[in-house]
Amino acid sequence: MNRSLINLGQVRDEPVFDAAEPPVDADGLKTALRHLGGGVSIITAGEGEARTGATVTSATVLSVEPPRMLVSLNRTSSTWPVVERFGHLCVNVVGPLHEGLANQFAGRGGLKGADRYRGASWITLASGAPVLEDAASAIDCEVEEVLERHSHAIVIGRVVGLRILGGGSLVYGNGRYASLDG
């Protein structure tokens, strides 16, 4: 496929896609999305030994009036049933110093459930979901609605608490982390 590229008002004819375009399947989509950097958040839910969580780049604001968050969770993950059971979650926006913790919650190193919480300090706000004490910001939510589509649960969270410490944020793209100074 040949498409024109616009560069500062000049049009150049160059192929945007390789002649061998990737198939439209899960692997092709994952390859395409590697080029989309995203903010890193640790989603936490549960209480005590029933706590778990996941590192995601899929947390985003749905609306600011009323305050609502949107998080997409794989329904086969260990996090989704805990969010469903407890009806809460916290979007912990993490900074550059949290790369190790982000890896831990991404399942690297094999830790599962409450063991993922090792090495960090945790508190709770209104919903009861675990909140990373030194997160750049934490958005505490009660589950308002869930849309189950294909492999994922799209969770709409009603924001019931905020904690904002500031600082930089961690982003992920092209298979690696980068930091944005705050």
Image: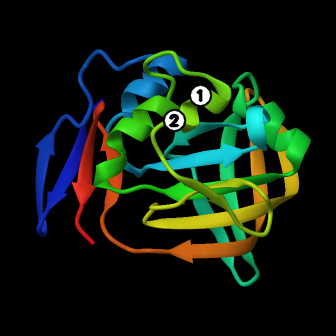
Looking at the picture, does residue 162 appear above or below residue 35? below
Which residue is located at x 84 percent, y 38 percent?
A: 148
Residues 38 and 133: in front is: 133
Quarter of the picture holding the C terminus: bottom left
Q: Secondary structure at mark 1?
A: helix
Mark 1 packing: few (<14 Cα in 10 Å), some, or many (20+)? some
Judged from this view, the residue extending furthest toward the bottom is 65
Quarter of the picture holding the N terminus: top left
Question: Would you say the residues marked 1 and 2 are in contact, meaning their CB atoms lie under 8 Å apart?
Answer: yes
Which residue is the site of mark 2? Answer: 118
As shown in the figure, which amino acid type bears the numbered disc 1? Asp
Q: Secondary structure at mark 2?
A: loop
Which residue is located at x 75 percent, y 46 percent?
A: 154
Which residue is the site of mark 1? Answer: 115
Apparent side of residue 17 relative to residue 42 in the rendered image (left or right): left
Instruction: Find residue 12 and report its horizontal and vertical position in percent.
Output: 10, 50
Apparent side of residue 160 relative to residue 116 in the rendered image (left or right): right
Which residue is located at x 79 percent, y 33 percent?
A: 50
Residue 77's quadrant in the figure? top right
Instruction: Find residue 43 and report its horizontal and vertical position in percent.
Output: 61, 47
Colour treatment of the image: rainbow
